[in-house]
Amino acid sequence: MTSSRDRILRTGAALSMTALALAGCSSGQPAGHAAPAAATVTVGSAADPSSWTLPMQAYRPTGEQARTLARAEQKLVGECLKGFGIRWRPAPELPRIGPKNLLDWRYGIHDAGMSAKFGYQVDPAQQARYDKALRAADARPQLSDDAQLVLGGTDVPAELLQKVGPEARRGFYAGRRIPEGGCFGQARRTLGGSPQGASPLVRRLTSDSYPASMEDPLVKAVFARWSACMKAKGFTYPAPMAANDDPRFRPRPEGASREEIDTALADIACRATHHVAEIWHEAETRIQRASIAGNATALAADRRALDASLRKAAEVLARS
């Protein structure tokens, strides 16, 4: 089932790490819904996880560091393409949409003011800015098929490989050999480390801790208390993300329905009453600490590789 949270994360994933960090959305089905058309709920925001951290964040770049790595990669790619006589400008960064950072919506909604207007949906003004920027990016002049091969090497769609000319198919462009992985591959080798700075191990452990946290006994217990709280307000769901994932709560041109808004406000009120996000976050923190202890050597090596990549990126950006 595709949830509103999934749609937001998939859209915002164009920025870089966010989708990886927020993987693991609940797939629970709502057990039913008996809310009146205009339920009365207490409007009060729950805890704001956007100011929190998780232990695995120590092994991945900050937002600013990720942007530094991206700028250095783009500079190296541009220099490589220039050597082939190809003019290229990277697409501008898309505006933010949805969560503020890695933790903001990891445990669900929490801002009653936003939910009173948008329910479980992203701010339509953010969506409109993002869609406009995406259309502008799509309208930019495209590189030729052969030049795209220089850009990405053989890591391009199969149909593109069928369209390139004979020289490019042999691995050359303008008489020069195309580097392995194209100019992007060459840039990433120069910087070292992993794309966007997070190693496969770091990404896996960050992703795995989310579903594991929902199996924690204390989290299951607080979910049960949240569910009872919701039922007392006329809403029947087994767990918080089941309300978030209700298939009736889809983006609509006319905005969120009264029913969606009432559900979201009841959800937040019950989260606040029972400290759902706090208990959930504490459980995931324990799980990540255990993962770090069990992978200490590999994670220390990943952190050293990230630091080396950041130093190299700073050198690339400092030179004229």
Image: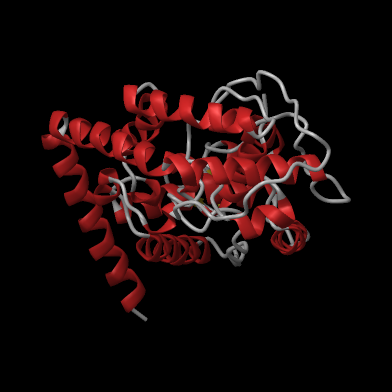
Looking at the image, the residue that sits furthest to the left is 297
Indicate the position of residue 224 as horizontal and vertical percent values: 47, 24
Instruction: Left or right? Give the position of 105 relative to 54.
Output: right
* Vertical order, 182 against 2 (above or below): below
Answer with left or right where residue 60 lies relative to residue 71: left
* Residue 293: quarter of image: top left
Question: Looking at the image, is 19 positioned above or below residue 47?
Answer: above
Q: What residue sits 77% from the left and 61% below the top? A: 128
Percent across and percent down for residue 48 are 45, 55
Observer-nearest of 16 and 260: 260
- The residue drawn where x is 35% and y is 54% is 52
Q: Residue furthest bottom?
A: 320
Whether residue 191 is visible to the viewer of this picture, yes or no, is yes
Q: Quadrant of the N terminus?
A: top right
Q: Is residue 56 left or right of residue 140?
A: left
Foreground residue, 303 or 45? 45
Indicate the quadrant containing the C terminus: top left, top right, bottom left or bottom right. bottom left
